[in-house]
Each structure stands twice: as C-alpha cells, then as structure tokens.
Image (tube, rainbow, N blue to C red):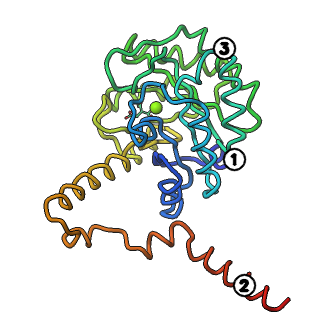
C-alpha cells in the first residue's frame, strides 16, 4: 500500500483521528489518510505535547487498519524517545498497519509546529533517528519533518532538509512556513518528495491543493480540518439540545442512520448473518 504513496504524482490527504473518520475519508474518495497527533490527542481530551504513549497510538493505527484499505500516514511526533526508541516505534507502527511515519526534529515536550516556544534538536540527533527508522522499516516511508523555520529561519530549515535527505529520509515535511513564497523557495532548493501541511489558525496562510501541486509538492495534508469542523458542529448541537430539549431543529444537519450504517458496512454484516443462517439450515 505504500506504493500508492510512492507512485502518486500528487495526493490530497485529510487528517483523521479514529476508524470512523478514516473510513469516511476512504468512502468519500481520498486515496490516503493522515493520522494526526493534534486531532487524535484532542479527541482524547488532551493537548498535543507528545504525552500519549506508543501503545495508545499503535492501538489506533490497528483499529484504522482493520476497517480501511488505503495508506495510513502516522504522525509519530518525535518518535517516542531517542534513536533506539525510534527503531522500536517504527517496528510497532509498521506492524500495526502504518504505511508511512512522520518524525519531527523537536525536543520533548513537543508542540504543535505552529505555536511559539518550540525547540529543535541538533540535526545530528535527528539523523540518528532517521537512520534508526530506516533500519527498522520494512516497506513504509520515512517522512522527516523539520520544525526549524520558526526557530532558526528558512535557510536553516532548508539545510536541515538536505541533511535529512542525505541520511535517507524518503519525504521532507517543512513545518510552519509562513508564505507561499517560502513554500516556493523550499521546493526550488530541496529537490525531493515534499509534504505540505495546510493546517488552520497557524503560521501558514490558506493555500490550495492546486497551488501546492503547481509548486511541486507531492502531498498536502489537511490534518485537523475535519476535526475542527466536527468539533464546532458538535458544540453547536449540544447547545441547541441543552436549550431546546429536542433535536427537532438539528434533524437536517444529521447524517442519517442509513448513511451512517453504509459507512460502517452494517449491511455487509447483516447479510453475512443471513447467509450463514441459510447455510446452517441446508446442512
Ligand atoms: C500536523 C500536526 O502535527 C498534527 O498533529 O496534525 C499539527 C497540526 C496542528 O496542530 O494544527 C502541527 O504540528 O502542525
Ligand atoms: Mg502532530
């Protein structure tokens, strides 16, 4: 499945945070999903500071893998430790069903790349993590993210990207660039498969998938978009319910039971049960 990631010219990839959202993305027609740390931790009611465990992340990857058959790019933050930890992280996440893993060059506690107060490790430390990841992986892609733009500037981010590529990273993810011009320059100077992060309310202005494609980016993720839309819709619905004591005014905003069941393959299980019962009668 990582072939889809390798061979596609350009992919628009939504961020998901559980099996339902991944399945929904697949059924709507997306060719890959991004398991976002930001969206996953928010859905767990926690901040995105690298405080969830590898087991918790792997559990979610397994659950998503069980119900979908499109590639999953997994946000593994800083890799759950130093280089030897990254080695095990890659083994665990790949066997859970990940097709690509993203590791970033921040120090712990890491932050959303678009916030102030981040710190980055020395490039040499990140190189060790990339090398450990390459030794551990069977087939999945290793995406190296640099958070350096916000700390040491674009030149440093470009230099780090080149160092990470040299170390063997398959894809480079420049985090929190601040303008279209910066993305253009990065793509001119870093000749590699590139991933752009089009998150909202951060340092990057809204840039469309078409624009990223024209600049030469291979992937664009919208990591927290559907979480944010859903979160607002849920809050609004709760307020209406609290105030009105009925869902009457919410009915036209809902996905119907039938649509919901189609997404979770309910009818497949219903038919399976019926068929098995018939076979039982015959024998
Ligand atoms: C891409 C990201 O790593 C994520 O966890 O989805 C976040 C997104 C966000 O917090 O908006 C990031 O650090 O950019
Ligand atoms: Mg993240």
Q: Residue furthest right?
A: 283
Residues marked 3 and 1 touching at CB (< 8 Å):
no
Q: Considering only order in the chain, which callout, 1 or 3, is on the residue closer to the N terminus?
A: 1
Q: Residue furthest bottom?
A: 282
Question: Horizontal placement of 183 versus 52: left or right?
Answer: left
Give residue 99's position: percent from left, percent from top. 65, 42
Question: Horizontal placement of 162 versus 89: left or right?
Answer: left
Q: Which mark is residue 3?
A: 1
How far apart are the alpha carbons under marks 3 and 2? 56 Å
Q: Nearer the viewer, residue 170 or 216?
A: 170
Give residue 157's position: percent from left, percent from top. 46, 17
Q: Residue at x 18, y 58 (%)?
A: 242
Q: Considering only order in the chain, which callout, 2 or 3, is on the residue closer to the N terminus?
A: 3
Give residue 204's position: percent from left, percent from top. 32, 32
In the rendered image, which residue does mark 3 sit on? 128
Under circle 1, the secondary element is helix
Dot 3, crowdedness within 10 Å: few (<14), some or many (≥20)? some
Q: Is residue 70 above or below residue 56?
A: below
């Amino acid at each position: 499945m990582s072939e889809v990631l390798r061979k596609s010219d350009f992919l628009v990839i939504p961020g998901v945070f559980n099996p339902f959202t991944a399945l929904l993305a697949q059924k709507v027609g997306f060719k890959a999903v991004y398991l976002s740390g930001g969206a996953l931790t928010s859905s767990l009611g926690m901040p995105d500071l690298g405080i969830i465990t590898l087991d918790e992340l792997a559990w979610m990857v397994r659950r998503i893998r069980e119900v979908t058959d499109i590639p999953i790019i997994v946000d593994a933050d800083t890799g759950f430790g130093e280089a030897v930890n990254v080695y095990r992280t890659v083994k665990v996440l790949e066997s859970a069903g990940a097709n690509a893993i993203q590791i970033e060059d921040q120090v712990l506690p890491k932050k959303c790349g678009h916030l102030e107060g981040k710190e980055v490790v020395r490039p040499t430390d990140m190189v060790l993590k990339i090398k450990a990841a390459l030794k551990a992986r069977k087939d999945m892609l290793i995406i190296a993210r640099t958070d350096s733009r916000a700390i040491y500037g674009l030149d440093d981010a470009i230099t780090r990207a080149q160092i990470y590529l040299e170390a063997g990273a398959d894809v480079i993810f420049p985090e929190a660039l601040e303008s279209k011009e910066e993305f253009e320059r990065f793509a001119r100077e870093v000749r590699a498969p590139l991933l752009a992060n089009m998150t909202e309310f951060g340092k990057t202005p809204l840039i469309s998938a078409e624009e990223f494609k024209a600049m030469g980016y291979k992937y664009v993720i919208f990591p927290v978009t559907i979480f944010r839309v859903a979160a607002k819709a849920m809050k609004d619905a709760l307020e209406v319910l609290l105030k009105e004591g009925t869902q009457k005014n919410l009915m036209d905003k809902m996905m119907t039971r039938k649509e919901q069941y189609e997404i979770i393959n309910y009818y497949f299980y219903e038919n399976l049960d019926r068929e098995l019962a018939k076979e039982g009668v015959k024998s």
